[in-house]
Image (tube, grey):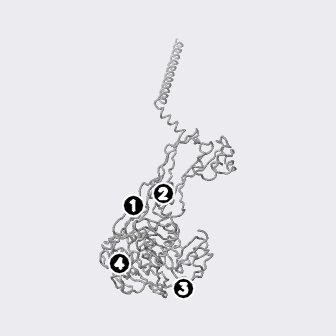
C-alpha cells in the first residue's frame, strides 16, 4: 500500500511540474507575442527611425563667411572653400577609371594618380587643396573621399589687420571680424550622409537637407590704397625716429568716414592703439580751448597777453615756454604754441565753460565706432579739479584721449563746428550684391558756430606755413594743423624721464578740407618734437596720395584750393636756445613748442627757418631703411618708390638741396 501510494504521489508531482512548466512557457510566449506586437505595431515608427539613424547621420555644413570690402569694392577679407582628396584603394572598383578621373579633374600627374591608388596601401591623400569645381567630378566615385573646409583669406596679407581682426575657431576675434561677426557669419546648413554597417560614410550617398546661407558682405569706408600708404609711411617714421609705435588716422571731416586707420606697437600691427590706448594730447588741445574762448566772446584772435619772457608762476606752479616771448596775440599763441599764453587766456573761462567745451568735442566719452575695445578716455568733472587743473587742461594735460578721439575733435574744427560720429561701415550687402543697409553720416552735436571754427582755420594754416609744423608745409596747397609733444607715462602711471609722445593733427586743404590727419608717435628718439617727427608723416602720406592714380580726393575741388607757389622765409642762421640747463640746437623745422607737463614747466620754442646748404648723399647700393634714416636726419622729406636696395635718387647724388626738400628714393622691386 505504501509503495503504491508513493508512486501516485510522484506521478502527481510530475503532472504539477509539467503544468507549471506549460504555464510558464505559455506566459513567456504570451509576453513575446505581446512584445513583438508592441515592437511591430506600437513602436514600429520609433524602431524604424532608430534603424535609419544607424545607417544615416547628419553633419553641419559651414556657411561661407561674408566678404569685407573697401569703399571701392576691393576685397580685404574673403572665404574660399578648399578640399582635400583622400583615396582608399581597397574600395576602388575600377583602378584605371579612378586614376583617369584624378588626372583629368585635379590635373595631377599620372605617376601621382598611380601612387595614391596603389592597392598595397589602405589610405592615401592626393597632394594639394582643390576648389569645389575641381572636385565636383570626383563625387560618387568608389574609393575617393572628399573633405572640404572654408578658409578665411586676406588678399592684401598684413594690410589693415588690426582693423579687420582675424578668425579663431570659426569666430571673429578683434576688429570688424568680431564686431560684425553675426552679420558676416551666415547660417550653417545640414547634409544627410549614408553609412555602412561599420559606420563609415558611403561615397556619393550625401543629400543636402538644408543648404548653408552665406554671410552678408560688409563694405567699409576704408580706401585700401590710402590705408597702404598710411601704414607704409607710419612704418618708415618709426624706423627713422626709433619710436616704439604709433597711430595714424585719416578721415573725411565732412562725413566722419574713416578712410585709413593703422597702429603699430612693438613692431606688430595686430592691435589698434588708435582706438584702445589713451595719451595726454598736449598742445593739440589748444584749438579747442581757443574755440571756447571765441564762442563765449571772451577774446578775439587779435587780443594779446604778456607771456612774461616765457615764464609764469601761478598757483604754486611755474609754466614756461622754450624761448623768451613778450606780448603775444591769441593768433601768435597758437602759431608759436605758447603754453604761458594759452594758460593765461584760458583763465578767462569759467571751469564749467572749459569743461563743457572739452566734453562737447567728445573727450571723456567713446566715439561709438563699431570696433571692440574702444576706451572712453579721461576728462574729470570740475568738482574734482585742483587749483592747477584749469591751466593744465589748457596745455593738454590732466585729460587722456585716443588718436581717434583727437581726429574726430579736430574734424569738428575743420568742417564748421559739427562733431561727427566716426563712420566705418559704409554698406551691408547680401551675398548676391543686393544692398541691405546703408550707413549714413551722423552729427553728434554742434560744438561751435561755423563762424568761430572758420576763423580759426587760417591760424592753424599759419602753424604749418611759419609756425611749429613747417615740415608739413606744401608748396601749392595750404595745410592747417597743430603739433604737440607731451611726456609719456610708464606702466606705473608715472612720467618716464626722456620719454615723449609726438603728435600732429592736420586738415587738407586748409580751405574746404577733404582729409583730416592725426598722427601720434610713441617715444621717438633724438629730435622727438611733434613738428619734427609726426608732421612729416602727414606730408609723406599726402605726397604719395596726390601722385597715386586713384584716391579719395576730389581733384577738381582741390584745384580751386591751389595757391601761388609758397615762398619760404629767407635763410637765417641756426638758432641756439637754452632748455632747462642743457643747450639744444634746433634743426630747421624741428620747432616744437609744447613739451609742458603737469606739475612741470611748459616750454615754447620760437620759429627758426635756417636753411643750411647741403647736397644729396650717394645712397646707391644702400638699403632703403638706411637711406630713409640718413635723409630724414638731414631734414629732408622722402618719397619711397620700391624697396630693398637703392638704385637711384631724384635729385641725383651731389645735387644741392635745402632742408624740407623732397627726395625720391627708388629701390629695386616695387
| Residue 236 pos. (x, y %) | 53, 72
Residue ID at (58%, 41%): 202
Q: Earlier in the sequence, mark 1 or mark 2?
A: 2
Q: Residue furthest bottom?
A: 573
Q: Quadrant of the C terminus?
A: bottom right
Does the rendering let one see residue 249? no
Q: Nearer the viewer, mark 4 or mark 1?
A: 1
Image quadrant in which you'd find residue 625? bottom right
- Residues under labels 3 and 4: Cα distance? 42 Å
* Mark 4, residue position: 391
Q: Tags 3 and 4 in contact by the CB under 8 Å rule?
A: no
Q: Nearer the viewer, mark 3 or mark 4?
A: 3
The crowd level at tag 1 (other Cα within 10 Å; few <14, some 14-19, many 20+) is: some
* Mark 1, residue position: 440
Horizontal side of 608 relative to 307 (left or right) equals right
Q: Secondary structure at mark 1?
A: loop
Q: Earlier in the sequence, mark 3 or mark 2?
A: 2
Q: Earlier in the sequence, mark 4 or mark 2?
A: 2
Residue 613: give its label: 3
Residue 172: give its label: 2
Horizontal side of 303 relative to 427 (left or right) equals left
Horizontal side of 105 relative to 235 (left or right) equals right
Residue 299: give its label: none
Q: Secondary structure at mark 4?
A: helix
Amino acid at each position: 500500500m505504501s509503495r503504491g501510494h508513493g508512486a501516485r504521489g510522484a506521478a502527481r508531482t510530475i503532472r504539477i511540474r509539467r503544468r507549471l512548466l506549460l504555464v510558464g512557457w505559455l506566459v513567456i510566449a504570451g509576453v513575446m507575442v505581446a512584445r513583438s506586437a508592441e515592437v511591430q505595431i506600437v513602436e514600429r515608427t520609433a524602431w524604424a527611425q532608430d534603424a535609419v539613424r544607424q545607417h544615416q547621420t547628419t553633419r553641419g555644413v559651414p556657411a561661407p563667411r561674408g566678404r569685407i570690402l573697401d569703399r571701392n569694392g576691393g576685397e580685404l577679407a574673403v572665404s574660399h572653400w578648399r578640399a582635400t582628396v583622400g583615396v582608399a584603394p581597397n574600395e576602388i572598383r575600377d583602378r584605371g577609371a579612378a586614376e583617369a578621373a584624378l588626372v583629368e579633374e585635379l590635373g595631377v600627374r599620372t605617376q601621382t594618380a598611380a601612387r595614391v591608388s596603389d592597392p598595397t596601401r589602405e589610405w592615401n591623400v592626393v597632394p594639394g587643396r582643390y576648389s569645389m569645381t575641381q572636385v565636383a567630378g570626383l563625387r560618387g566615385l568608389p574609393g575617393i573621399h572628399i573633405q572640404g573646409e572654408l578658409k578665411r583669406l586676406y588678399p592684401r596679407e598684413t594690410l589693415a589687420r588690426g582693423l579687420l581682426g582675424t578668425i579663431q575657431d570659426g569666430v571673429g576675434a578683434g576688429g570688424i571680424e568680431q564686431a560684425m561677426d553675426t552679420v558676416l557669419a551666415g547660417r550653417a546648413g545640414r547634409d544627410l550622409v549614408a553609412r555602412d554597417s561599420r559606420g563609415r560614410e558611403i561615397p556619393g550617398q550625401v543629400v543636402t537637407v538644408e543648404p548653408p546661407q552665406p554671410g552678408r558682405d560688409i563694405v567699409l569706408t576704408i580706401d585700401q590704397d590710402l590705408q597702404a600708404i598710411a601704414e607704409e609711411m607710419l612704418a618708415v617714421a618709426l624706423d627713422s625716429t626709433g619710436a616704439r609705435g604709433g597711430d595714424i588716422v585719416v578721415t573725411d571731416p565732412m562725413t566722419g568716414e574713416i578712410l585709413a586707420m593703422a597702429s603699430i606697437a612693438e613692431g606688430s600691427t595686430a592691435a589698434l592703439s588708435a582706438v584702445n590706448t589713451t595719451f595726454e594730447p598736449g598742445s593739440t588741445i589748444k584749438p579747442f580751448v581757443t574755440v571756447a574762448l571765441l564762442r563765449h566772446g571772451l577774446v578775439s584772435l587779435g587780443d594779446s597777453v604778456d607771456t612774461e619772457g616765457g615764464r609764469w608762476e601761478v598757483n604754486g606752479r611755474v609754466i614756461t615756454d622754450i624761448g623768451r616771448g613778450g606780448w603775444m596775440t591769441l593768433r601768435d599763441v597758437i602759431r608759436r604754441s605758447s603754453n604761458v599764453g594759452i594758460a593765461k587766456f584760458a583763465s578767462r573761462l569759467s571751469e564749467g565753460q572749459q569743461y563743457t567745451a572739452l566734453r562737447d568735442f567728445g573727450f571723456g566719452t567713446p566715439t561709438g565706432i563699431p570696433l571692440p575695445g574702444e576706451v572712453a578716455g579721461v576728462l574729470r568733472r570740475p568738482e574734482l579739479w585742483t587749483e592747477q587743473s584749469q591751466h593744465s587742461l589748457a596745455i593738454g594735460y590732466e585729460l587722456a584721449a585716443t588718436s581717434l578721439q583727437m581726429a574726430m575733435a579736430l574734424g569738428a574744427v575743420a568742417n564748421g563746428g559739427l562733431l561727427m560720429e566716426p563712420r566705418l561701415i559704409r554698406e551691408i550687402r547680401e551675398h548676391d550684391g543686393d544692398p541691405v543697409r546703408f550707413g549714413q553720416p551722423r552729427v553728434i552735436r554742434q560744438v561751435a558756430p561755423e563762424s568761430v571754427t572758420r576763423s580759426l582755420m587760417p591760424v592753424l594754416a599759419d602753424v604749418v606755413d611759419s609756425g611749429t609744423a613747417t615740415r608739413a608745409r606744401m608748396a601749392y596747397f595750404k595745410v592747417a594743423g597743430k603739433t604737440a609733444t607731451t611726456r609719456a607715462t610708464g606702466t606705473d602711471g608715472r612720467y618716464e624721464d626722456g620719454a615723449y609722445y609726438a603728435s600732429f593733427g592736420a586738415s587738407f586743404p586748409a580751405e574746404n578740407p577733404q582729409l583730416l590727419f592725426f598722427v601720434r608717435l610713441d617715444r621717438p628718439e633724438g629730435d622727438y618734437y611733434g613738428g619734427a617727427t609726426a608732421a612729416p608723416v602727414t606730408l609723406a602720406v599726402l605726397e604719395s596720395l596726390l601722385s597715386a592714380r586713384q584716391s579719395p580726393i576730389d581733384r577738381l575741388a582741390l584745384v580751386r584750393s591751389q595757391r601761388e607757389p609758397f615762398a619760404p622765409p629767407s635763410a637765417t642762421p641756426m638758432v641756439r636756445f637754452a632748455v632747462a640747463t642743457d643747450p639744444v640746437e634746433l634743426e630747421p623745422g624741428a620747432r616744437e613748442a609744447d613739451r609742458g607737463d603737469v606739475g612741470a614747466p611748459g616750454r615754447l620754442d620760437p620759429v627758426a627757418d635756417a636753411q643750411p646748404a647741403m647736397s644729396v648723399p650717394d645712397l646707391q647700393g644702400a638699403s632703403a631703411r638706411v637711406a630713409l634714416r640718413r635723409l630724414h636726419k638731414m631734414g629732408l622729406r622722402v618719397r619711397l618708390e620700391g624697396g630693398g636696395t637703392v638704385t637711384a635718387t631724384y635729385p641725383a647724388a651731389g645735387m644741392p638741396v635745402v632742408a624740407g626738400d623732397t627726395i625720391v628714393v627708388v629701390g629695386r622691386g616695387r
